[in-house]
Amino acid sequence: MDVKANYEEVLDKVAAACTRSGRNPEDVTVVVVTKYVSPERVEKAIAAGVEHFGESRSEGLAAKLTAVETPVHWHFIGRLQSRKVKEVVHECDVIHSLDRLSLAREINKRYKREKPIPCMVQVNVSGEETKAGVTPAELESFVRSLSSCEHIQVAGLMTMAPHVEDPEDVRPYFKQLHSLRAHIQNLHLPHAPCHHLSMGMSNDYEQAVEEGATFIRLGTSIVGSEVSHG
């Protein structure tokens, strides 16, 4: 597994996608998902130049934090249970999966730092029952309700597109999230600047970048997989 070569290939493809869509590659952050790899593989990614990592379980985040000494940026990208908030809220820089008011209230209660924690509101743009997230119709009211959580900043929106054979088929979902972000931005809510779009994974990140992604979440295409996905 040549992590450095994989990472450089992704950066080249991101740059090309930015060129096609008139964007600056510096506006796109690659978040390397480490759920299926060891801390040693994380260290290889750090050596390759990766600075942002994503974990989807509190246990996985804790294990990586214990083993990885190099300071990097950690993103929590999985569904977050309210009872696990206290374990992650001060250990990650961004939460990508804020999807319900009860979770927001728990984050707000547990978070003790002066600056609010940046959170992405997860939106279920595909309407799949298996995916978490607020519906597009619920988004504005949900974001407005977060004004009571002084320790949370709505930094952007996140979605998980359907897994399909042709990545072009998910482009409409990315376009919709981009449109929803513009709507939230136009509300000019102090707690919700909503600058970011967290969308795109290993199979569709080029399309996501072309449609405005600022965070793309890639795992196997960069660091591979060392454990069962079961």
Image (cartoon, rainbow, N blue to C red):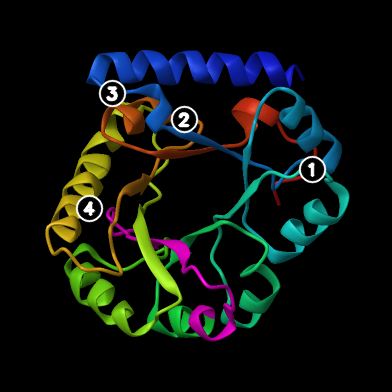
Mark 2 or mark 1, which is nearer the start of the sequence?
2
Q: Secondary structure at mark 1?
A: loop
Residue placed under numbered mark 4 in the picture? 181
Task: Give the mark nearest the N terminus, 2 or 3.
Answer: 3
The local secondary structure at tag 3 comes to loop
Percent across and percent down for residue 162 are 38, 45
Task: Work out how far the residue at label 3 is from the one at label 1, CA to CA, in angstroms.
Answer: 36 Å
From the image, state whether disc 3 or disc 4 is nearer to you: 3
Q: Amino acid at mark 4?
A: Arg
14 in magenta: no
Quadrant in which the N terminus appears = top right
Q: Earlier in the sequence, mark 4 or mark 2?
A: 4
Q: Looking at the picture, does residue 136 appear above or below residue 217? A: below
Q: Amino acid at mark 1?
A: Val
Left or right: residue 180 versus residue 41 is left
Q: What segment carries the magenta color? A: 107-128
Q: CA distance from mark 1 to mark 2?
A: 20 Å
Q: Nearer the viewer, mark 4 or mark 1?
A: 4
Nearer to the camera, 216 or 112: 112
Front residue (pair 44, 115):
115
Q: Which mark is residue 227?
A: 1
Q: Which residue is mark 3?
A: 23
Q: Earlier in the sequence, mark 3 or mark 1?
A: 3
Q: CA distance from mark 4 to mark 1?
A: 36 Å
Task: Kindly indicate the quadrant of the structure image that contains residue 210.
Answer: top left
Amino acid at pointer 2: Asn
What residue sits right under mark 2 in the picture? 203
Q: Is residue 201 above or below residue 188?
A: above
Residue at disc 2, secondary structure: loop
Give the amino acid type for the residue marked by disc 3 in the picture: Arg
From the viewer's perspective, is the residue at label 3 or at label 1 nearer? 3
